[in-house]
């Protein structure tokens, strides 16, 4: 076990951090308020090869792992310009398609996902199913011409600037007649597919959407992978989602602590920097310790995933997502407190993070569902839900 990153990973961090510094909070903030995507940053990150690091080289990706993609996510968030759709397009969808798609599907989707020229949204959550993916009611019916998709999805990110979407539905098993999860990828301009933005109090560039699918006709090859293996295929994409969510939270925590430490060194009251007072320094130091612990958890999860330990990565990814969310919230809260009233002034770039950091307790999986997972699978306790 070596906690030192390779020369390539160190160089990658440096390059991504430099890209983040050239954009930063000054670029992100006005676009977040206008609910506009970070198009220029996304395009440059894609052309630089940062978005598709986890995807196979033969399809235009970097041939690296989830560790490297999480590294990019962390550094951009630490610079104040995180890209939410990295979690969705290359991490979830790119992983699922590269692992389970046909050669034709890989050739069709992966090059665009790798260089960022194609953005793919992901729809799993439904208004009445919540965290219970077994209660999904979106259905796919096979007929003579392909598939017919009907259903609803909620809290789907970035559909307005996506080219395609990967939808979790349920298809009828020809042998048993039972409905089983199935995954379908198709363009967002497919007839019968509509979306509507949800009004949110969170200030961020990417909007959230309700999806409506009414007799959406899809070709047979819209189905990704095998009809009867979609649940395992789905979770192959959800572990990367949790790792990336943890990386984003770690980066956000770093951003907040960097702001707080700088302010505590410069702001003078009673003739000395406020950082000399333990009432300021100790809470920031505690937040730093907790953030570094959560980063280690995230790095462990990414390393296990890249090593092919799916079960170990599942446990570690859930724990990392939980720990990083809690640490990020603590960092942001203490950074705001350190700034006093200035912590809520727009120019300091912290106030919006009070809600932004809090989102990670809910999405992409709630804190309570992670605790359910840990209780049942890590501790061997009876299932409680």
Image (cartoon, grey):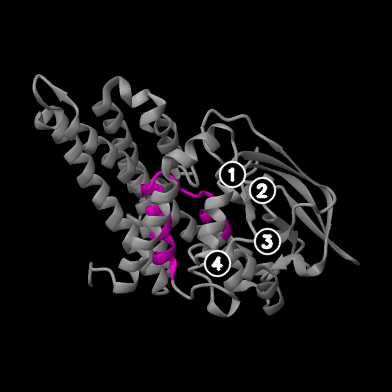
Res 178 visible: no
**What is the spatial separation of the Cα atoms under label 4 and label 3, in whole angstroms?**
13 Å
**Foreground pick, 246 / 383:** 246
- Per the image, the residue denoted by label 1 is 37
- Per the image, the residue denoted by label 4 is 95
Q: Earlier in the sequence, mark 1 or mark 2?
A: 1
Q: Earlier in the sequence, mark 4 or mark 3?
A: 4
Magenta stretch, main secondary structure class:
helix
- Per the image, the residue denoted by label 2 is 161
Task: Report if residue 67 lies within the magenta region.
Answer: yes
Q: Disc 1 on helix, strand or loop?
A: loop
- Per the image, the residue denoted by label 3 is 183
Residue 238 locus on image (x, y percent): 51, 58
**What is the spatial separation of the Cα atoms under label 4 and label 1, in whole angstroms?**
23 Å
Q: Residues within 10 Å of mark 4 (few under 14, many from 20)?
A: many
Quarter of the image for residue 273 reads: top left
**Do callouts 4 and 3 mark residues in contact (Cβ within 8 Å)?**
no
Q: Earlier in the sequence, mark 2 or mark 3?
A: 2
Residue 33 locus on image (x, y percent): 54, 32
Q: Earlier in the sequence, mark 1 or mark 3?
A: 1
Quarter of the image for residue 288 reads: top left
Q: Check the picture and name the quadrant holding the N terminus.
A: bottom left
Q: Earlier in the sequence, mark 2 or mark 4?
A: 4
**Do callouts 1 and 2 mark residues in contact (Cβ within 8 Å)?**
yes
The segment highlighted magenta reads 65-89
Residue farthest to the front? 22
Q: Nearer the viewer, mark 4 or mark 3?
A: 4
378 versus 127 height, above or below: below
Q: Nearer the viewer, mark 2 or mark 3?
A: 2
């Amino acid at each position: 076990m070596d906690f030192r990153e390779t020369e390539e990973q160190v160089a990658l961090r440096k390059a991504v951090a430099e890209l983040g510094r050239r954009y930063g909070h000054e670029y992100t903030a006005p676009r977040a308020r206008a609910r506009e995507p970070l198009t220029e940053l996304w395009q440059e990150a894609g052309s630089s090869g940062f978005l598709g690091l986890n995807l196979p080289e033969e399809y235009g990706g970097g041939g690296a792992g989830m560790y490297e993609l999480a590294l990019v996510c962390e550094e951009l968030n630490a610079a104040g310009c995180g890209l939410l759709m990295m979690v969705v397009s290359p991490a979830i969808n790119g992983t699922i398609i590269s692992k389970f798609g046909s050669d034709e599907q890989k050739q069709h989707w992966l090059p665009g996902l790798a260089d960022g020229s194609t953005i793919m949204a992901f729809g799993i959550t439904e208004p009445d199913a919540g965290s219970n993916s077994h209660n999904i009611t979106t259905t796919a019916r096979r007929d003579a011409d392909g598939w017919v998709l009907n259903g609803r999805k909620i809290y789907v990110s970035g559909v307005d600037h996506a080219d395609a979407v990967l939808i979790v539905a349920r298809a009828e098993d020809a042998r048993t007649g039972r409905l089983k999860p199935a995954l379908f990828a198709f363009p967002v301009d497919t007839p019968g597919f509509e979306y509507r933005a949800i009004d949110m109090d969170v200030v961020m560039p990417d909007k959230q959407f309700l999806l409506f699918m009414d007799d959406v006709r899809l070709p047979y090859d819209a189905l990704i992978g095998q009809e009867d293996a979609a649940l395992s295929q789905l979770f192959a994409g959800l572990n990367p989602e949790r790792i990336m969510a943890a990386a984003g939270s770690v980066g956000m925590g770093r951003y907040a602590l960097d702001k707080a430490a700088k302010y505590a060194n410069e702001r003078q009251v009673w003739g000395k920097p406020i950082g000399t007072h333990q009432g300021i320094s100790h809470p920031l130091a505690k937040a730093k310790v907790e953030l570094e612990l959560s980063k280690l958890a995230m790095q462990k999860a990414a390393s296990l995933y890249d090593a092919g330990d799916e079960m170990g990565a599942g446990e570690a990814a859930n724990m990392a997502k939980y720990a990083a969310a809690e640490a990020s919230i603590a960092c942001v809260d203490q950074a705001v407190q350190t700034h006093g009233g200035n912590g809520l002034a727009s120019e300091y770039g912290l106030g919006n993070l009070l809600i932004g950091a809090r989102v990670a307790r809910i999405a992409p999986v709630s804190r309570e569902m992670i605790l359910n997972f840990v209780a049942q699978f890590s501790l061997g306790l009876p299932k409680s839900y």
